[in-house]
Image (cartoon, coloured by chain):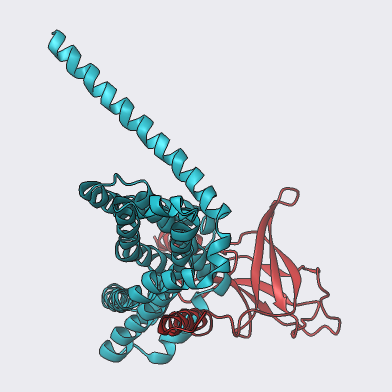
Chain colours: A cyan, B red
């Protein structure tokens, strides 16, 4: 009896510890974001630091984003055609592909890919800097590691993400066009004109860009924070990288729900 | 501070991203045509708007001449008040008839203007008095069925 009581108490203690730990980390992450914003001056004054990070997180993600966008668009074209031809409205393929990409799939899938391609490498880099005590060394030399290391990586990610999401959507539309018009033979004029009639610039495209911008902030913050907060051992860094990918994915999907319910509720 | 190859790649990346946004804006969206620079507002009251939606088109002779910007319920007259932004290039006579049509059997609903012969034109903010409500398909079908049933009883 007392054995079982002990188990229950231990379980509750663990649960409480985990909950307090989460809240603690959340608070630290919020303070960390404020610190990044406060020390962002260096990232903009010495712009080449930020440009270097745009190269690492943006340019090096180009290939995976563009190829994935193309394939997602092609699958949308195939599946959309398959469903729409049952109702004899295959001309609506263009609208379907463009709306699903600009509103949802572009920002979300590009965000997930960005988190696993660029976010994880940022976490690994900062985590290893912590393991090899480079961050401490900077502090010793009166160089603020948040201003010198963290802020440029954060802003590099924030700049790259909307551009990558727009590229993903554009490639997806081209992929849908390739399958729908070139391979299957949907009418080219109807494909584009229906798309242009159904997609509104401010409502659909700008909202998609806002989404990708928010995801960029979230993923970049999570990536730099997990790296900075990692336990400075080999195992600790590898755990931090896993956490970056998992937390980013969950955050993107949860934020997407919240943003969608604000942006697209109750209209058309 | 020197120029590096890295800058070239980042410039290439940013240009590509902006090109994608331009592509989305001009080719996928309708920034070039449908965003009317100058518009004026007209209102119309309907008994029943059916499935009319905000942002739906306003058409005259089949051409899109405006967009629906707001749909409200008037608690005094118990009617739906539909506000529309009309392209500033087009003016419509006072006796214009506003009806709600459906594109195809199950397509989206839109407001159609049938132009009358009056000399005076509608001014911005005017309310169109002659309107026709949406055709509710269920009502039509039930009317048809009842009339058929009545015919059947008559012939007995």
Q: Nearer the viewer, residue A138 or A50?
A: A138
Query: Residue B21's spot in the image, x, y percent?
Result: 50, 78
Name, please, the residue furthest toward the front. A141
Q: Within the image, what quadrant is residue A177 found in?
A: bottom left
The residue at the point 46 percent across, 81 percent down is: B7
A108 lies above or below B21: above
Q: Please state if A29 lies on the left or on the right of A126 as rendered.
A: right
The residue at the point 64 percent across, 68 percent down is: B68
Name, please, the residue furthest toward the right. B120
Query: Residue B56's spot in the image, x, y percent?
Result: 58, 70
A180 lies above or below B150: below
The residue at the point 36 percent across, 77 percent down is: A172
The residue at the point 24 percent across, 17 percent down is: A9
Q: Within the image, what quadrant is residue B59 found in?
A: bottom right
Q: Within the image, what quadrant is residue B91 found in?
A: bottom right
Q: Please state if A90 lies on the left or on the right of A196 as rendered.
A: left
Query: Residue A80's spot in the image, x, y percent?
Result: 31, 74
A207 lies above or below A96: above
| Image quarter (top left, top right, bottom left or bottom right) of the C terminus of chain B | bottom left
Name, please, the residue furthest toward the top. A1
Q: Nearer the viewer, residue A140 or A108?
A: A140
Q: How many marks?
A: 0
Residue B150 visible to an observer of this rendering: no
Residue A91 visible to an observer of this rendering: yes
Q: Nearer the viewer, residue A122 or A86?
A: A122
Q: Nearer the viewer, residue A53 or A254?
A: A53
């Amino acid at each position: 009896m007392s054995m079982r009581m002990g188990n229950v108490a231990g379980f509750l203690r663990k649960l409480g510890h985990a909950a307090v730990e989460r809240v603690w980390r959340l608070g630290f992450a919020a303070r960390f974001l404020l610190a990044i914003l406060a020390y962002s001056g260096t990232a903009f004054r010495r712009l080449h630091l930020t440009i270097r990070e745009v190269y690492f997180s943006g340019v090096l993600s180009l290939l995976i984003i563009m190829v994935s966008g193309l394939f997602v668009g092609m699958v949308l074209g195939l599946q959309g055609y398959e469903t729409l031809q049952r109702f004899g409205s295959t001309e609506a393929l263009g609208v379907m592909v463009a709306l699903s990409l600009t509103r949802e799939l572009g920002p979300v899938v590009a965000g997930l890919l960005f988190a696993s391609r660029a976010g994880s490498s940022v976490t690994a880099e900062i985590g290893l800097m912590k393991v090899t005590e480079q961050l401490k060394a900077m502090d010793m030399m009166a160089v603020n590691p948040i201003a010198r290391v963290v802020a440029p990586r954060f802003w590099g990610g924030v700049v790259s993400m909307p551009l990558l999401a727009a590229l993903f959507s554009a490639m997806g539309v081209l992929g849908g066009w390739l399958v729908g018009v070139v391979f299957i033979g949907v009418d080219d004029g109807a494909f584009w004109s229906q798309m242009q009639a159904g997609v509104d610039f401010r409502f659909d495209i700008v909202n998609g860009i806002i989404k990708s911008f928010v995801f960029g902030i979230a993923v970049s913050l999570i990536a730099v924070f997990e790296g900075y907060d990692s336990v400075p051992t080999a195992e600790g860094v590898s755990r931090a990288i896993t956490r970056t990918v998992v937390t980013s994915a969950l955050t993107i999907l949860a934020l997407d729900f919240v943003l969608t319910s604000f942006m697209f509720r109750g209209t058309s | 501070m020197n120029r590096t190859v890295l800058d070239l790649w980042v410039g290439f990346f940013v240009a590509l991203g902006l090109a994608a946004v331009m592509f989305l804006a001009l080719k996928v969206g309708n920034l070039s045509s449908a965003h009317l620079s100058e518009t004026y507002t007209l209102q119309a009251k309907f008994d029943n708007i059916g499935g009319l939606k905000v942002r739906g088109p306003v058409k005259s002779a089949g051409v899109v001449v405006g967009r629906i910007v707001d749909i409200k319920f008037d608690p005094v007259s118990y009617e739906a008040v539909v506000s529309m932004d009309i392209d500033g290039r087009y003016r419509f006579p006072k006796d214009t008839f506003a009806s709600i049509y459906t594109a195809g059997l199950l397509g989206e609903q839109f407001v159609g203007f049938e132009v009358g012969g009056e000399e005076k034109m509608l001014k911005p903010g005017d309310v169109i008095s002659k309107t026709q409500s949406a055709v509710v398909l269920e009502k039509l079908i039930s009317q048809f069925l009842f009339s058929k049933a009545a015919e059947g009883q008559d012939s007995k």
